[in-house]
Amino acid sequence: MMHKMVKVIIADDHTLFTEGIEQILLSLSGFEVLAKVGNGKLLLQTLNRLTPDLILLDINMPLMDGIEAALLIKKQQPNIKIMLLSMYYDVKMIAEVKGDIDGFVMKDITAPELKHAILDVMGGKQVFILPEILQQKSKVKIADSYLDRYKLSVREIEIIGLIGQGKSNKEIALDLELSNYTIETHRKNIYRKLNLQGTAELIRFANEHGLGIRG
Amino acid sequence: MMHKMVKVIIADDHTLFTEGIEQILLSLSGFEVLAKVGNGKLLLQTLNRLTPDLILLDINMPLMDGIEAALLIKKQQPNIKIMLLSMYYDVKMIAEVKGDIDGFVMKDITAPELKHAILDVMGGKQVFILPEILQQKSKVKIADSYLDRYKLSVREIEIIGLIGQGKSNKEIALDLELSNYTIETHRKNIYRKLNLQGTAELIRFANEHGLGIRG
DNA sequence: AATTCCATACCCAGTATTGGGTATTGCTTT
DNA sequence: AAAGCAATACCCAATACTGGGTATGGAATT
């Protein structure tokens, strides 16, 4: 296994990304890209005629998302290794797939790191590479950036994150053991600082800035 | 210009993506990648010592987002071409940058299309490649998929999209010339079908499935 | 023909959110 | 010492949203 080409299928709806990954794997050598597919259904169909060693699988895809596809594939062809690729980290999601998936990496790792992760997975390890923010002992680095740009406080950033995960003010108040009034006040300040109106715009902001990451 | 290497800087916080793009450009030949940077500030610093012909610039980056950086760079070094890369399409955003930016492409185009777009830009054209969904005469293709998966109706998908853009029920009712009651009813049905609770979860869904794209 | 689904619309009641404002305490900066 | 900021908390009022339900008409399916 360590000495032969790893046959890979790449599944991601962003073509630039899949073609980029393909080029990366070719440049790393040791890999053969069997196919690149843009959605979960196409992936299942492709598996009817190709048998990879490994699938690199984006979580967010049209028609059938990555996790859904992964669980199906694992059931049908348990020998195929599956590594999930994501821009986001979500504790609930990881817990959901932990027993079934061979690896999880985020899109901010380097190509050598990806290669290393793949080889670990092919060697039988289960590899979960956590996002940098969770590896750090503190969140000073990311928090500082939002402090600077938007004059957001640490608490405000935290609350944006919780809202970004879909929590209501009430839930957040319970989580943080604060009054509901306090959460509302923070939200008022957040809207003012970011010049946003309403939950929808705020969540969009959170997503675009990766602030829905649970930490 | 057509016969010499195009010097490119790639700016995107997802390292796998920047390294992928680099590999793509190398495989296409005719390009020299001067640098890959992960945020807007680093990009500005890099421009103090390198002068590219072209910057491929992701919109969503930490510390300084793509548009902010682009407008600054265009002011300081108007001869550098800038092409924005995005996963999302937003009419308002495009209108905002249309006068300043040389190109906009989405991450679901192919590498040859990217090359073609770059060469057009380097040749003096302004290139805006619209997402596939906007190029289609109808939305049957994407709508069908959600019909199947979630039993969502065409109207429901449309309303998710509008909510995903941050519109209130009242605004949507005005847009679609319907009663506010109707929008609320559609929302109730959407929550039930998707097993979601509240605006935050719905918007997250919309974003993850690209349903915030204006069509 | 009957049933189901979709689109549209409404009522009711309760909760959630937003925007205006106020206030206190503690810490940091000037 | 004074000022500014963050965290926390509250009041008021209005609007927005949610979840329960009802209903009609038209189109598609059974």
Image (cartoon, coloured by chain):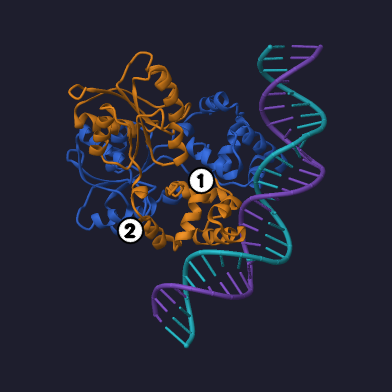
Chain colours: A orange, B blue, C purple, D cyan
Q: Secondary structure at mark 1?
A: loop
Provide residue B174's location: percent of width, then percent of height. 66, 44
- Of all chains, the one bearing label 2 is B
Observer able to see residue A48: yes
> Up-down: is B73 above or below B194?
below
Residues at marks 2 and 1 on the same chain: no
- Kind of residue indicated by mark 1: Gln
Name the residue rendered at 52%, 41% in the picture: B204
Name the residue rendered at 60%, 59% in the picture: A179
- Of all chains, the one bearing label 1 is A
Estimate how packed mark 1 is, as few (under 14), some (14 to 19) or many (20 or more) residues with alpha carbons within 10 Å. many
- Kind of residue indicated by mark 2: Lys
Q: Which residue is mark 1?
A: A165
Observer able to see residue A23: no
> Up-down: is B51 above or below A148?
above
Q: Secondary structure at mark 2?
A: helix
C-beta proximity under 8 Å, tags 2 and 1:
no
Front-most of residues C10 and A95 = A95
Q: Would residue B124 be found to the left or right of residue B193 on screen?
A: left
Q: Which residue is mark 2?
A: B75
For the residues marked 2 and 1, what is the alpha-carbon distance in whole angstroms?
A: 37 Å
Provide residue A137's location: percent of width, then percent of height. 34, 54
Provide residue B191's location: percent of width, then percent of height. 62, 36
Which quarter of the rendering shows the N terminus of chain B?
top left
Q: Would residue C3 be found to the left or right of residue B173 on screen?
A: right
> Up-down: is B106 above or below A179?
above
Provide residue B24's location: percent of width, then percent of height. 25, 34
